[in-house]
Every structure is written in structure tokens, then in C-alpha cells.
Amino acid sequence: MIFAHVPYFVAGWIFLWGLYGIVTSKNLVHQVICLTVVQTSTYILLLAIGFKTGGTAPVFADIPVGTVVVDPLVQALMLTDVVVEATVMALLLSMVVKANELAGTIDPEELKIMQG
Amino acid sequence: MTITALIPLPVAIPLIAAAFIALTGSWLGRRVSDSVAIASAGTNLVLTLLILRGTWSHTYVYWFGNWWPRSNNVVLGICFSVDAIGAALAVLVSLLTTAALIFSWRIFEDTENHFQPLMLIFMAAMCGFSFTGDLFNLFVFFELMSVSAFALCGLKTLEPAPLQGAFNFAVVNTIGAFMILMGISLLYARTGALNFAQVGHSLGSQSDALVLVAFLLICVGYLAKSAIVPFHFWLADAHAVAPTPVCVLFSGIMIELGIYAVARIYWTIFQGPLAAHASEMRNILLVMATITAVLGGFMCYAEHHLKRLLAFSTISHAGLMLAGVGILTSKALAGFVIYVFSHGLIKGGLFLCAGIVLHRLHKIGEHHLHGRGRGMWFTAALFIIGALGLATCGPFGTLLGESMISDGAKQVHQGWFAYIFMFVETLTAAAVLRATFRIFFGWGKPAPTDKSSRIDEGPETKPEGVTPVLMFVPAAALILLGICITGVPQLRSAGRANAELFMDQPRYASSVLNNVQLAAPEEKKPESLTPSIIRCLATGLLALLLALATVFRNRLGTALKFTRSLELGNSLVRKVHSGHPGDYVAWLAFGTALLGGMFFWFLR
């Protein structure tokens, strides 16, 4: 039964490593990728929550009613999550491209314009 | 019921209009896009006002696709459950968007961009956010609102500063959104539900580590949106560089919606599990509120970039608003709503005034502008009225909000919070007055500079010798509405009755799950305003004296040296606001750990 909790720890672990990457990053592109690492932890958490031992795909077209299936709702949540975050990543990366064009750097340390 | 049929429209109509403008904008031209956008925002204003009138005494629940819960309290559909508080926030959203869109008639005239569709999507998301009765739906609207906000913030892609601001904003808020999603998933894992009412109903009063972690994650996510210290760093960078009409929405309502979400989720879901620890909860929130208010106030006074100054003033007022929620009484909650509404109008008006200054003088740093605003008397007058509104000195809606939050604090034996109000309002109002005296009257010596105030903002408009009517009227209208709101009959008693409804978890659950329409309870007679009026007059006077002392310190002698250090700010605190997204995320993690520690120490 101890293994039932492993996915939750993995999710937390990935979340924290992603944060570590963002905090220490010296490159904006790397920072955006670290953000997707943080996001991956939410996938694992959702998978862990929706999973049922022995469950099959929740498509009732060709399986009898009453079959054990995994939770279909978390898939909908995850799909929304994927779509929204893809937008955010695209937006962030396009900002990085623009920042590189304007300031000639993608080091967040050198891009500190507004501060104090 | 006709009101029920209106409920989805404030979200649907702007989304359709946004799609229409995005598709046809390049053929129909800028002016047609502008007109469609303003018409859509105006329609939203009328619709939300109708909904507010309907919900003044009753709540309404709208089930999408008519999927109302058929049996055993099991919710399968998604609902908008609207009460007067949600409706009032939606009215504020529509009002500010309308004003911002009218103001923007003269902005970005020669560039092709996606300004209007983004503004409409932003408005639709914020209306949906204040109406929804579903956790995941709240998250989706939160994300929709965030993404359009990131894009709007970085709209001026020809300057590096907006890109930096938008990047920091996006990174911090996206991590906040992931935390919210994790919190929602944990709640779903425990209860198998996403509807506020059903989650609250299933949780009952059971409280354990999982519920606390979920509450922590959701709280941090929404508090990061509402710029509560130590999650506030992104706000000053983003607000200072966003286009002016966008700042109006950021400061006027977006921040406040984060606090609203914490309130909504606390009272519909976590009130039961945390019932035994309400006073500890209150203390934690009040401590956060106080730190935010005081730090924001000091930083506000130390800024000389006009928009960044207003941004820090928003942070400190966000602290005051958090207190309105954190006191956990119906009176303070009603005060919160009134304060949010009037603060949104006044702060929105002040940002538009800053936009007028940028339009006329093409600079935004206080030292560049010294004395150059002579002759712009109407704008100067608006700045002064707005500053008095921030000081609650006069017949402003903020006065009613302040008095209710302070009375609420006294009820729970935290009467000292009234002095925090006075202190913070003195600082923020004095900062605006000081800038006004220097810019428009040319009094005293030019302001000292700081790193931010030396950054020039590119002009948003073509140069012009007079203030266009379409810029001045929205600014004046917002600030004057901040005064007119006090004329709404029975504002305080109705606010209080609706706040009681907002806080009543069992009745909220029955209204959603069993389709019972709720009526607001009997209206109570509001208490006397006299103590608040005395406090507020004192605040206004202190703010005026502080501003004058700062401006004329060279003439008035060494006793006023302290105004100089106040204006220069603490160099360590300044350094902490480093403009580096990594630092901000480190603070976010630190704040989460600290808040989590407090939750586990005090709320178990």
C-alpha cells in the first residue's frame, strides 16, 4: 500500500525541482522550460488521482456498463491544463524572442530594467 | 425567470465580439473595431447592472445546458451562482473596461494589434470569474484572465521594459495557477466533486492534512494574483509598464478578484473544516494584510515613476482589502466589497490621469515632469480629488468601506487596524499629492530619482497640445463615480445583508444543490459614521501636511529631514524588488513554506 502514495511524492518532487530551475536559471528559454517542468507535476498528480487499479479506458461504447474504469473527469481537467499552458508557453517564448531582439540578451540578470 | 437567462450573457457576448473583431478587424479598420468593442463593453455594463438589481435581494443559479442536480445532491453540470457581491464585481469589471476602451480610442492609433479583442476576452473572463460556482470553472476563467492579461501587459513590444514586466508577471502567476490546480485536484480526490456547494457539503467539518494542503495551495495561488506580500513583486513591474487602459483593469479589479476568490472558497468550502480555528485564521490573514499594507505604503512613497507609484499604492490597498476579508465578519466583508468598488473607480481614474500626463508630456518620471504640467488644471484637480479618495477624506465610497472594515475589526477586538488604515492611506495619498504639487504646480525642488523613474516610457499617442475629450471624460467619470456610489440608497445595510448570505455555507449549498432561491436577510441599521469621518479628515490633513513637508523641506528646515529618507526608501527593501523572475519565484516558495508552516501550526 505504501506504493499508492509514490505518485504524490513524485509530483511534489518534480514541482520543487522545476521551481529550483526557475530560481537559479541564467537563461530565459531555460526558465520557460523549467516552467513546463513545474507543470508536468500537475499531470502526475492528476493521473494519480484519476487512476484505478485494474481500470480500463472510460469509453463505454464497447465495454459493458459496470466495468471498472479510470476517472474520465481528470482527463478533461488535464486537457484544459495542457491547452492553457501551451498558450502561456508560446506567449512567454515569443516574449523571450522579442527581448532578445530589443535588449540583445536572454539573461534575466541583464534584463532587470524595472526594479527598486 | 428573466434574470437567470441574462446570467451567461456578460461572458458570452464579449467573447463573440472579440472573435468578430479579431476576424474582421483588419478589413473594417480601427474605428469600427473600437466601436464594436465599446458597444460590447457598454452592453455588458447594462447587463451586469440588471443582474445586480435582480440579485440585490435574491441569489440566482444558472445551470449550463440545464444540467441541474437531479438527485442525492450530486452535481454533474456546471453552474454560475450569482449573488449581489459577485454581480457588483462584474459591474465594476464592465464599468472599468468601458472607460478603458473609450480612453484607448486615442491610443495605439497607427499600429496593428490585438488590443480590443484581448480587452474583451479579459472582461469576459473576469465576469465569469465573479459569477461561477465551480472550482475548475473558476480556474479556467482565472487562466483565461491571466493569459489575456500577460498579452495585454506586454503589448508594447517595441520596448524591453514591458517585456520584462510581462515575463515576471506571467512566470509568477503561472506557478500560482499550478498551485491552484494542485489544490483543486486534491479537493477533487477527497470529495469527487468540483462544485463549491457540493465540495463544501461533502467535506462537512472534517479537517486533516490533505484539506489544509489544498487550502494552502489555493490560497497562495489566488494571493499571488492579488499581490499580497511576499507574492507581490511582479505587480509593480507589470503595472508600471502596461499600457494605461490595461493598468486600470489590473489595479482596479484583477487584483481584487484574487482576494474575492479566497473569500468565496473559504466561505463555501473551508469554513466547515476550519470552523474551530477561525480566530487563528483571522490572525494569520490580518498579519499578512498589515505587512502588505505597510510595506506597500512605504514603497509607494519611495517611488518616482508615476505608474509604479500608483502600483505600490495598489499593493498597500490590496492589504487593506485582505483585512476586510480576513476579519471574517459580515460587516467587514460588506466593507471589503464597497471598498473594492470605490477603490477600483478611484485608482482607475488616477491611472487614466497618469495616461493623460504621458500623452501630453511624454514622460512618466516625477523629476522629468517637474513643473511641466502647469496649465493642466483639470488633470491636476482630478489627481487631487483622487488622492483625497485614497485618503477617504470626503464623501467617497472608500470612506464607507473603511468605516465598515474598521468597525468589523473592532467587533473582533482588533480595533488597532483602524490606525493601519489611517497610516497607509496617509502615505499613499501623500505620495499622489506630492507628485501633483511637483508636476502641476512646480513647487519645491525636483524629485530625487530612482532606477525605475529614469526609465522612459514610449509615448502611446501622437503628440498633441490639448487633452482630448475622450481621454479626460473617462478619467473624470470614474473619479466622480467613486463619489456618487455613496448616494446608492441603503448601500451599507444591503451590503451587510448580502455579506451574511455570502458567508452562510449551508444556505449557499441548499441554494445550489436543492435549487432553493435565497433571499437576503433583514437589513440592519448601519452604525454611525462619525468616528470614521473624524479619522478620515485627520488622514486627509496628515496626507496634505506630509506632501507639503516633502515638497518644501528645503525651505522649512532640518526638522523635515525625515521626509527625505521616506522619499528615498530603504535601500535593502528596494534591492529585494530586484526585477529578476527567479528571485520572485524564490520569494513565492518562501512565502508558501511560511504560510504552510503557520497553517499547520495554528489551524490543526
Image: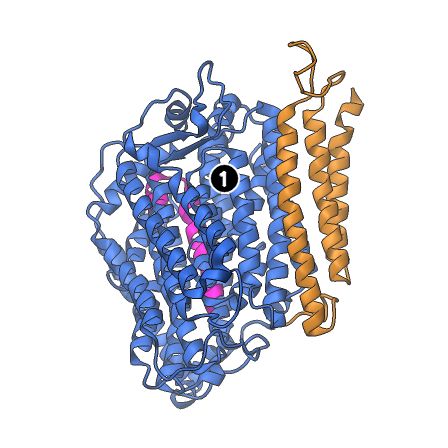
Question: x, y (%) of residue B513?
Answer: 42, 22
Against B532, residue B499 (above or below) is above
Position of the C terminus of chain B, as image quadrant, is: top right
Question: x, y (%) of residue B531?
Answer: 25, 55
The verdict on residue B553 being magenta is no
On the question of residue A115 being in view, the answer is no
Judged left or right of residue B320, residue B530 is left
Judged left or right of residue B47, residue B302 is right
The verdict on residue B318 being magenta is yes
Question: x, y (%) of residue B530?
Answer: 22, 55
Tell me where residue A113 sits by quadrant. Answer: bottom right
Position of the N terminus of chain B, as image quadrant, is: top left
Q: Residue at x 48, y 46 (%)?
A: B125
Q: Residue at x 45, y 61 (%)?
A: B28
Q: For the view shown, which residue lies furthest in the bottom direction?
A: B555
- In this structure image, what is the colour of chain B? blue
How many labels sit on residues? Answer: 1
Question: A50 and B400: which one is in front?
Answer: A50
Against B373, residue B78 (above or below) is above
On the question of residue B336 being in view, the answer is yes
Q: Secondary structure at mark 1?
A: helix
Under mark 1, the amino acid is Met
Question: B360 and B9: which one is in front?
Answer: B9
Query: What chain is tagged by disc 1?
Result: B
Which chain is the one coloured orange? Answer: A
Judged left or right of residue B499, residue A14 is right
Q: Main secondary structure of the magenta part?
A: helix
**Circle 1: is it few (<14), some (14-19), or many (20+) Cα within 10 Å?**
some
Against B602, residue B473 (above or below) is below
Q: Which residue in the protein does label 1 denote?
A: B281
* Image: magenta residue range: B309-334
Question: x, y (%) of residue A23?
Answer: 73, 56
